[in-house]
Amino acid sequence: MKKKILITSLLAGMLFTNTACEDNKEEFLSDFSTILYFKQSGETPLTLYKTGETTNYKLTVNKAGSELNSTTEVAISVLDKAALDIYNLENRTEYELLPNDCYQIDQTAMSFAATDLYKQLGIEFNTDKIHDLINADQKSYVLPLQLTSANDSVNSEKNRAFIIPSVEIPSVYFEKNGYLSNSITEDADEIVTLTCPIKMLVDNQWTFDCTVSIDEAMLDQYNQENNTELKLLPADVYEMNKTVSFVPGSSTQDIVIKINKSKLGFENYALPLVLSDITNKNFVIDAKKNSCIFGVKSKINLTVDMLETNALEPTEGALKNLLDGDVATMFHSAWSVAVDGDHYLQVNLKKEISAFSFEYTTRKENGNAAPAEIIVSGSKDGKTFTEIVTINEGLPTEGAQQYASKTYTADFSFKHLRFTVTKNKTGGKFFVWSELGLSGK
C-alpha cells in the first residue's frame, strides 16, 4: 500500500513540475478529474502597515483537472504546533505559530460550483497585535494553512500556504532628498510655479495633513559640509503652502512654491525644507528623508551651439546631452583618441558677464571620470583666457551627484567661459558630465 501511495505522489509531483509556472488548469492529466491547490502556495512574505486598522488579505484556491465543470468541496485548516515543528525541522526554519487572536479566517470550507474555477479565502490580520508581538520577542511568525478534501485530489506540492507577516509603520517623506536644483530661465513666466513632492509608501486611504517648515540652521550646516554658499531665498520672492493635505486615493502631494522672477536675484538661493508634523498619529515622518534643500536660481539659456570642446569622444557622449535634462545621457571627453593638453568644455555666451555660478551632474551609473580639479577661466575674444578660479575641493565623486558652485566674480568681463579638467578622480585626463547649468550677469 505504501508503495502505491509513493508512486502516486511521484506522478503528481512530475505533473505539477511541468505546469507550476504556467498554472494552466485545463492541462492536468485525465487521471485527476478534479485537483485543488493554493495559487500562493509555499512561503509568502506579507508586509502589513500599522495604521490602527486591521488588514485584509486574499488567498486564492484553484480548481483544476480534466473535469473543470465538476462540483467539489475543500477544507482549510491551520497547522498545529507539532506539524509546524516538523516543517521547521525539515526546512531549517524557526517559525513560530501566529496566535489565533492575531487573525481571523472568513471560512474553513469552500464549495465549488460547476462554474467556479477558483475561490478566495479572506484573512483579516490584526496589524497592531502582530506589530507588538514581533517587537516584543523579535521572532518570525507564520500562519500555516492546509487544504484537504474528502472527495477529490489535492496537489501535494501546493496544498500548504505559509503566510509570514511583517509590520511596518507607514512613513511620509520627501521624494527627493539632499540638494534639489530648480532653475528659472530668462524666458520663464513672471510667476514661476515649482513643486516639491511628498510621498507615502502605501496606497493612501486616509485624510491627514503634514506641516512643512523652514530650517535655516540646516542650510548653514549643508553649506559648511558641502563647501557651498547657498543663500536663504528671501521671503518676499516666493509664496509656499506650509501645510500639505493628503486625501484618500493619493499617495503623493506637492509643496507648491511660486517664485516672482522679477524679484529673484543672481545668487544661488535655497529653501531648507523640513517635514515637522503629521496629524495622523499612526504615521511617522521618515527621519532619513524628512528634509530637502530646495535650490532656486536664475539661469542662462544654454543651447548646443554655445558649447565647444577640444576633446570630443568620437564613440559616445555628445555635447547636446549636457542640456537634455536627462541624467542617463552624458558628455564624455576623449578616451579612445589622444588629445594634446588638458580637456576642456567651453561656453560661448551671447553677452559679456563678470560674475557667474555653475552646476553639473556626474554620470548616472557611477562616479567614473568625475572631475577632481577644474580650472575656470574667462576670455573676451575666445583666444586669450585668464584664470578665474581653481576648484579642487568639494567636487562630487559618486554617480548622479549634483555640484552647485559658489558665485565667482572676476575683475574683468568675459564672453567665453572655459572649464578645464586637469585630472579626474582616478588621475586620468578625460571627464564626464551628464548635465550642465550656468548663471551669470
Image: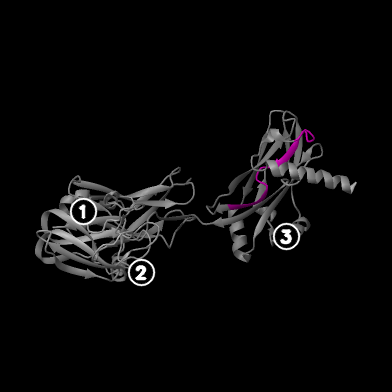
270 or 435, which lies in front? 435
Q: Position of residue 107 (x, y in %)?
A: 70, 41
Magenta-tinted stretch: 29-46
* Identity of the residue drawn at 29% across and 55% down: 435
Residue 302 in sight: yes
The amino acid marked with disc number 1 is Leu
Q: How is the image coloured?
A: one colour
Give the residue at mark 3. Answer: 88
Give the residue at mark 1. Answer: 307
136 or 165, which lies in front? 165
Q: Position of residue 176 (x, y in %)?
A: 37, 56
Residue 293 in sight: no
In the rendered view, tell whether residue 111 sits above or below residue 237: above
Q: Position of residue 177 (x, y in %)?
A: 37, 59
* Number of numbered discs: 3
407 or 417, which lies in front? 417
* Identity of the residue drawn at 23% across and 53% down: 238
In the rendered view, tell whether residue 391 sits above or below residue 402: below
Q: Residues within 10 Å of mark 2 (few under 14, many from 20)?
A: few
Q: Position of residue 244 (x, y in %)?
A: 36, 50
| CB-based contact (under 8 Å), mark 1 and mark 3 | no
> Is 295 contained in the magenta span?
no
Give the residue at mark 2. Answer: 426
Q: Secondary structure at mark 2?
A: loop
